């Protein structure tokens, strides 16, 4: 791994990042570029601007795994409030909501997580939208897919985000190809026994997984801003005879906005992944780690370099 990338990820400590943001304008600009803000109101403002530009949105709250039942309940209530507000302002039809199972108690109690996630899915249905479950790392894949299967008994539109970096994901994509699946490369570290460690191998598996999803009857969402993969997805979708509205491109908030606009102008469905919340430190570090050469001005204050 690039040493600077490693340093950026290590610098994701919340207190350190907050100190830099409080004193360095360039850091504040970076936060505003990649994170919608800390509050639901911030998220709704950013969402409205994107929808006005012909884009769709996936909202994700940047929280922490629930340490107890009270924390899980707070996460549920936050998502219920978010969904109510999306409905009230007329944005729900263009916005889906991500749900991290650990935030609603999966590590505490599987039954608790199912009950809490069911409450969020029911609220999403009432609001006129849907939920996508996020698989945080390789150890969570099987529990999340088990939760997904239970939720889809009542809410078949529930989606899941899978990581092409994991060796198992091609089989998972084949099994889920008739449903809604978001495919992303994956950024979390995992041992070589369960994940590809070479970036080229990850890209190859991304294409294999994309083919599996496009061959199915579901609605695939291709979460990548890699120009090569965006082009390949377009070519493979044409090969499989997919209409542009039958799949989605997804890119992170603040990343390649001109490309997002270009694809949308061509008639593609483009969804922007919009993060918000107080725990934005790790997300910002991952965005910066994707472009370490351009992150030096942000990193120097954290490392005490001139």
Image: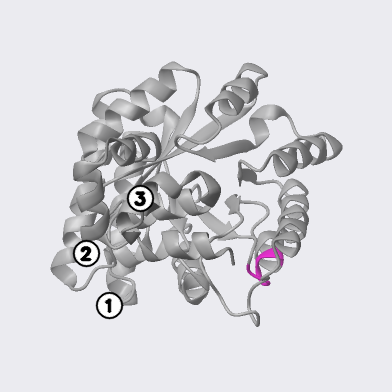
Q: Residue at x 19, y 44 (%)?
A: 22
Give the camera-side residue of 90 and 284: 284
Q: Is residue 120 depicted above or below 111 in this figure?
A: above
Instruction: Please identify the residue farthest to the front as the structure is shown.
Output: 306
Which residue is the site of mark 1?
108
* Colouring scheme applied when the structure was drawn: one colour
Q: Determine whether label 1 and label 3 are within 8 Å by CB.
A: no
**x, y percentage for residue 176?**
64, 59
Instruction: Please identify the residue farthest to the right as the structure is shown.
Output: 239
Q: How would you rate the neighbour count of disc 3 (Cα within 10 Å): few for under 14, some for 14-19, many for 20 or more?
A: many
Which residue is the site of mark 2?
72
Which of marks 1 and 2 precedes in the sequence? Answer: 2
State the separation of the CA atoms marked 1 and 3: 20 Å
Q: Determine whether label 2 and label 1 are within 8 Å by CB.
A: yes
Residue 231 in view (yes/no): yes
In which quadrant of the rendered image does the N terminus lie?
bottom right
Which residue is the site of mark 3?
121
Q: Which residues are magenta?
A: 166-170
């Amino acid at each position: 791994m690039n040493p600077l990338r490693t340093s950026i990820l290590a610098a994701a400590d919340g207190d350190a990042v907050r100190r830099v943001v409080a004193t360095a304008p360039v850091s504040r600009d970076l936060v505003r570029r990649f994170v919608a803000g800390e509050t639901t109101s911030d998220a709704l403002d950013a969402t409205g601007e994107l929808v006005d530009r012909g884009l769709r949105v996936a909202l994700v709250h940047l929280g922490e795994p629930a340490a107890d039942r009270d924390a899980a309940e707070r996460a549920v209530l936050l998502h219920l409030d978010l969904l109510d507000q999306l409905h009230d302002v007329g944005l729900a039809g263009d916005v889906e909501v991500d749900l991290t199972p650990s935030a609603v108690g999966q590590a505490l109690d599987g039954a608790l997580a199912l009950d809490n996630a069911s409450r969020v899915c029911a609220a999403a249905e009432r609001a006129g939208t849907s939920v996508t479950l996020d698989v945080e790392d390789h150890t969570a894949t099987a529990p999340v897919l088990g939760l997904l299967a239970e939720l889809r008994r009542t809410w078949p539109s529930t989606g899941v985000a899978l990581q092409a970096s994991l060796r198992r994901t091609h089989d998972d994509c084949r099994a889920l190809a008739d449903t809604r699946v978001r495919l992303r490369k994956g950024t979390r570290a995992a041992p070589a026994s369960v994940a590809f460690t070479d970036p080229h191998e990850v890209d190859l598996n991304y294409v294999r997984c994309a083919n599996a999803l496009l061959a199915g009857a579901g609605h695939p969402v291709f979460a990548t801003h890699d120009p090569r993969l965006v082009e390949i997805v377009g070519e493979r979708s044409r090969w499989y005879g997919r209409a542009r509205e039958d799949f989605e491109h997804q890119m992170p908030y603040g990343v390649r906005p001109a490309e997002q606009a270009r694809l949308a102008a061509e008639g593609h469905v483009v969804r922007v992944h919009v993060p918000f919340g107080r725990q934005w430190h790790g997300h910002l570090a991952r965005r910066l780690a994707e472009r370490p050469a351009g992150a030096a001005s942000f990193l120097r204050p954290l490392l005490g370099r001139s």
